[in-house]
Image (spheres, helix red, strand yellow):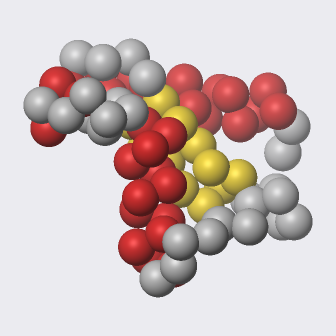
Amino acid sequence: MTHEDYMREAMAVADIAVKNVNAPFGVVVVDNQTGKIIHREYDRVKEYCDPTAHGEINAIRALCQERKTLSLS
C-alpha cells in the first residue's frame, strides 16, 4: 500500500467517526515491516468526555493492551 492508500483508509475511518461521535478524525496504525494496517481508531474525546481520548492515543492504548506491552517498537 502507498501513503495515499493509508490516508484514504484513515479518511474512511473518519467518516465512521462522524457518523458515530460527530468528530472527523480517523487513525490507522501501520506495521513498518509488513506495511499492513494493524489498527483503526478514531477520536472519542466527546464520547468519553476525556480530553486525552484522541484517535492516536486510543490506538496506542489498544495496541499496548492487545500486545500486553508498553512498547510498540
Q: Is residue 13 visible?
A: no
Q: Nearer the viewer, residue 40 or 62?
A: 62
Q: Nearer the viewer, residue 73 or 59?
A: 73
Residue appearing at x 84%, y 66% in the figure: 34
**Residue ranking furthest to the bottom:** 68
Image coords of residue 70 (percent x, y): 53, 72
Q: Considering the image in quadrants, where does the N terminus appear? A: top right
Q: Is residue 25 above or below residue 9?
A: above
Q: Is residue 73 above or below residue 19?
A: below
Lateral position of residue 47 relative to residue 59, left or right = left
Q: Nearer the viewer, residue 51 or 3?
A: 51
Residue 54 found in image quarter: top left
Residue 16 found in image quarter: top left
Lateral position of residue 51 relative to residue 15, left or right = left
Residue appearing at x 61%, y 61% in the figure: 38
Image coords of residue 65 (percent x, y): 40, 73
Residue 66 found in image quarter: bottom left
Lateral position of residue 67 relative to residue 35, left or right = left
